[in-house]
Amino acid sequence: MPSMHNKELLGGGHATVIGAGIIGLSCASSLADVGLAVTIIARNLPGDKSSQWSSPWYGHLESAKDSLWPKKGSHGARSNRNLRQYQFLAEREQETGVRRVTVTEYYDDRAANAPIWYEKLFPDFCKVIPSSLPTGATLGFSYTGLVVDPNVFLPWMTQKLRSQGVQFVQRELLSLEQLEGTSSEGVLINASGLGAGQLARDDKVIGTRGQTMFVRCNYDRAIIYQGSEYNYVIPRKPSGGVILGGVSQPGETTIQVDQGLRKDILDRVNRISKGAFEWVDLSTDVDLDIVGLRPVREGGLFVERKGSVVHAYGAGAWGYVYSLGVAKRVQELAVARDRSKI
C-alpha cells in the first residue's frame, strides 16, 4: 500500500499510460495508488478481441522466466513480490479469475541437476523422477502455482481502475509526438507492447506469433514444456476449458489459423500430458482457434526512463508473470521524476 507521504507528494500530478495490456493496466493501478490522476490511451481496450495484443489470450502465471530482466539479480525479489500479490488475488478467485493449480514444467535443454532459482518460492516444489519424464525431456518439476483466466481478470482489473478514477481513451497512436502538449505536466508511460517498435523506435521489438486452441473440459493441471519445443496446457476453469498450445514464431505476423499446426499441437500436448487429450476431435471439439502476436524484445524487458518518458515493454508471453514487478519499477521511476520537480 502507498504511504500518505506519497499521496500528499504526488496528489494533483498526472500520468498518461499508452497501452491497455496487462503491463499497462498494472502500471496505471500502481500510479493511481500513489495519488496520480491516470489516463490510459490505447488502440485496444479490455473487451476487444484482437490478435494484435496478447493479454486477452494468454494467462498463465507460474513463476518467472529468469532471463527477461536484463539486470541479473533483480528478477528474484520482483518475482517473489509478484507471486505474493497474485497469491493474495487467488483468495478472491471468483472475482479475479486467479486460481491455484498444480503446475508441471519440463525442459529438454537443461541438465537433470540444473539449479532452479525459484524453487524456494514454492513449499511443495518437487522434481519429477526420470522415469516419469515425457520423451525427450531431461528435467521436470511440479509445484502449486497460479493461473489467470483473462476473461475474468481483465474485466475485474478494468473495474478496479475505474474505481480508482482512471480514465480510458480508445485511440491509436502512431508516434509519441502526438501526445505533445497533453502530458507536459505529467509523466508518460510507454507500455504499448508490440507498438513500442514504432512508438519507441525500438528495432529490437519483434512480433512473435502464437497459436493455441480452446477445448471445453474439466482438466485442471497446468503443464509447460520448453526448450526445443514450446508446448503447454493451461486450465481456464471459469471459462470452462483449457488452452492447448502452442508455437512461438518470431517475426511471423500472419494472424490466420495455420490448419497444419492444429494436429501438431494436439500431438505434442498429448505427449506431455500422458494422452489426456486423445479424445479431442479437431473437427468437433475445438471451441476456438486462437492466434495472437506476443510483444517480444531481443535483450528482454525494457523498463527505463528516457527524458520525459518511462518505457515498460518487452515481456513477450510473460506479461502476467512480470506485470506487478514492472508496475512497481515504473512507479519508482515516475515518483523520482515527480519529486525532481518539487
Image (tube, rainbow, N blue to C red):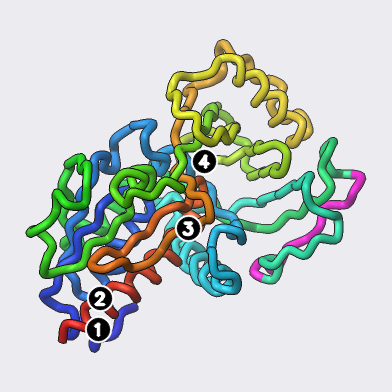
Name the residue rendered at 56%, 68% in the picture: 75
Looking at marks 4 and 3 on the same chain, the residue that comes earlier in the sequence is marked by 4
Name the residue rendered at 17%, 52% in the picture: 177
Can I make out residue 203 in this image?
yes
Looking at marks 1 and 3 on the same chain, the residue that comes earlier in the sequence is marked by 1
Considering only vertical position in the picture, is 292 above or below 145? above
As shown in the figure, which amino acid type bears the numbered disc 3?
A: Leu
Q: Are marks 2 and 1 in contact (CB under 8 Å)?
A: yes
Q: CA distance from mark 4 to mark 3?
A: 30 Å
User: Residue tagged by mark 3?
Assistant: 301
Name the residue rendered at 84%, 54% in the picture: 111
User: Residue tagged by mark 4?
Assistant: 237
Q: Are marks 1 and 4 in contact (CB under 8 Å)?
A: no
The local secondary structure at tag 2 comes to loop
User: Does 130 appear in magenta?
Assistant: yes
Please identify the quarter of the rendering in which residue 324 is found.
Answer: bottom left
Considering only vertical position in the picture, is 186 above or below 68? below
The image quadrant where one finds the N terminus is bottom left
Disc number placed over residue 6 in the picture, else none: 1
Considering only vertical position in the picture, is 173 above or below 110? above
The location of residue 322, given as percent across then percent down, is: 48, 59
Considering only vertical position in the picture, is 95 above or below 170? below
Looking at marks 1 and 4 on the same chain, the residue that comes earlier in the sequence is marked by 1
User: Does 45 appear in magenta?
Assistant: no
As shown in the figure, which amino acid type bears the numbered disc 4?
A: Lys
The location of residue 303, given as percent across then percent down, is: 41, 63
